[in-house]
Image (cartoon, rainbow, N blue to C red):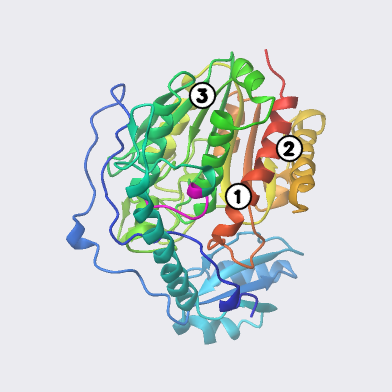
Amino acid sequence: MRLSLTQLSLTAVVALAVVLSTSTVSTEAFPAPIDRRPSSSSLVSFKSYDQHRVVRVKVQSEEQIKILNENEGPLKFDYFTHNKNVGGHIDIRIAPENFSRFQSLNLNYETLIENLQTVLENEHNENLAYQNKWEASKNNRVSIDGVDLKEGTAFVSAADWFAGYHSYADHQTWLNTQIKTYSSIASSFSAGQTYQGRSQAGIKIGNGPNNVVFHGTQHAREWISTMVVEYLITQLLTGSDSRVADYLNKYTFYAIPIMNPDGFVITQTSDRMHRKNAQSNGGCLGTDTNRNWDSHWDEGGSSSNPCADDYMGPSAFSSPEAKNMGAFLKSMPNVVSYIDFHSYSQLWMVPYGYTGTPPSNYDSYLQPLASGAVNALADVNGVQFTAGDIYNTIYPASGNSADYAYDAGVGAPFAVELRDTGDYGFSLPANQIIPSGKETWAAFTYILDNLQTN
């Protein structure tokens, strides 16, 4: 068993009482939201993963890939990773009623997690301890620049905030507090409204001529991506790095910690392992927004099955979350970089995902940028990432955000898979938030120092 219960430490905040309200960030430029959120009474309990296993399959032949594809629907595979390439491996969650049939496929596998429910229950119990301390600490806070910390979730130090994972409501208050506290260099924006009417709320930092867009949590269960984006925001607002002042004059940053807030709330109220957005699709919940972008949509590496976790949707940009972000990118001039943060696998990737033939400037610009980023990242904590194009590094994936950004004229788009490589997966311990943030900041600054700009 790769993951033992003794390895578990404080990880994600599974807040049973999440305030399911839209963000207070102004969205006057966008249509009024359509409220499709369920009533609190419909959110009855968390989905159970009792006796669900997570296994790692070593892919040894094209025949095994065929076997996996043929059994994905019947055995209801939930792919934690999607690398269906010969010589690679793929992590799959399998329900107990399907495990004997999975074993009969005679695939080479190892068990990473024997009972996912036990992991999640221990995770939840440890999170409650952190949340209780967090809530209690609010009573001891004071106001900063007119922001009443007792009414919000601003933090006395970054160490407080990054010591654990937080509820959706706290994330939104945190973001608004940063905007108010650092109003001389920061302001609010929104990419648009989600399917359930929440704001894709972000923070604009700096006043440079070159635009950089980055976000986390396109996939709902990848909570470390939210925290890493917020760590980068914190460094741009308050960090001691001497280069920050130059960055704010050279670039304007647009950061959205939670691109898919509807899905994120689902992971905190009913299903910790939910990946997609909250659209209803013939009895199954959600579209994989990162297979729904209008770039070579439905050209492989995605599913037409509404119940699959990589369901591409009925048409390109059928999900408002992806459509909003695509329109936002296209509306903005001179976007020199776009970064879509995910987890897990430790990869720093560039287009393309729809084809194995990389862009024409792959060798001269994109690959050196990605390689330099992972080298800078490794210098911090010794953690090794792999750089390359999406198709050949992780898997074929059409309709993804990085491909769309490149085709829309973004100079250097990246798809990043953060820690780890499978020991903890989506339940990355909270004591890895700050180390992950520090190493990602090193990679981020390498890119900022080496981008082609005007």
Residue 299 visible in image: no
Secondary structure category for the residue under label 3: strand
Q: Amino acid at mark 1?
A: Ile
Asked whether, in this view, residue 86 is left or right of residue 104, the answer is right
Front of the two marks 3 and 1 = 1
Judge whether 154 appears above or below 429 on screen: above
Asked whether, in this view, residue 5 is left or right of residue 279, the answer is right
Check residue 308 in the rendering and tell me which mark sits there, or answer none: none
Residue under label 2: 358
Q: Residue at x 24, y 35 (%)?
A: 33
Q: Earlier in the sequence, mark 3 or mark 1?
A: 3
- Image quarter for residue 55? bottom right
Quarter of the image that includes the C terminus: top right
Q: Spatial distance from mark 2 to mark 3, Cα to Cα?
A: 32 Å
Secondary structure category for the residue under label 1: helix
Q: Amino acid at mark 2?
A: Pro
Circle 1 crowding by C-alpha within 10 Å: few under 14, some 14–19, many from 20 = some
Q: Spatial distance from mark 1 to mark 2, Cα to Cα?
A: 33 Å
Which residues are the magenta region? Answer: 160-167
Between 72 and 82, the one nearer to me in the picture: 82
Residue under label 3: 205
Q: Position of residue 378 (x, y in %)?
A: 77, 48
Check residue 434 in the rendering and tell me which mark sits there, or answer none: 1
Between 193 and 357, the one nearer to me in the picture: 193
Front of the two marks 1 and 2 = 1
Q: Amino acid at mark 3?
A: Ile
Between 114 and 88, the one nearer to me in the picture: 114
Q: Position of residue 407 (x, y in %)?
A: 60, 28
